[in-house]
Amino acid sequence: MARRERNGPTWYLGAITDEEARTFDVPTLVPYARTEIRRRDLRGWAGGELAHESAAVTISKRPVDATSRLHIVLAPGGGQAIRIRPAR
């Protein structure tokens, strides 16, 4: 799921899964990367391995642009939240 901040440039993406682990790629060539702001900062929060048994969370941060691909890895029973906003 992806949602844009109301009247703002920040986008939020979220994904969850059941007891099955999942891995997929998401291109950033979507509305949050096509605006006049080319470079963006991504910050992600992901449930750790065996997320359904643990409260472990991994936090990551990196620059992205319209050519970047997000590699999403969801642990069994886990999820991921991502914020993409203009680079500062």
Image (spheres, grey):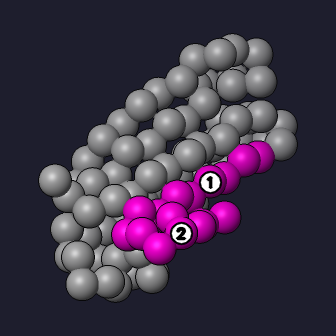
Quarter holding residue 1: bottom right
Q: CA distance from mark 1 to mark 2?
A: 17 Å
Question: At 42% from the left edge and 69% from the top edge, which residue is drawn?
Answer: 8
Mark 2 element type: loop
Coordinates of residue 14 in the picture (x, y in percent): 62, 54
Question: At 44% from the left edge and 43% from the top edge, which residue is drawn?
Answer: 44
Which residues, given as a range, are shown in magenta?
A: 1-17
Looking at the image, the residue that sits furthest to the right is 18
Determine whether, in the image, residue 32 is placed left or right of residue 48: left
The reply to whether residue 26 is visible in this rendering is: no
* Tag 2: amino acid: Arg
Binning the other alpha carbons within 10 Å of mark 2 as few (below 14), some (14 to 19) or many (20 upward) gives few
Task: Say if 38 sits above or below 54 in the image.
Answer: below
* Tag 1: amino acid: Gly
Report the disc number at residue 77: none
Task: Say if 22 sits above or below 9 in the image.
Answer: above
Label 1, on which residue?
14
Binning the other alpha carbons within 10 Å of mark 1 as few (below 14), some (14 to 19) or many (20 upward) gives some
Label 2, on which residue?
6
Question: At 38% from the left edge and 45% from the top edge, which residue is drawn?
Answer: 43
Relative depth, front residue between 23 and 44: 44
Determine whether, in the image, residue 32 is placed left or right of residue 12: left
Task: Say if 24 sits above or below 77 in the image.
Answer: below
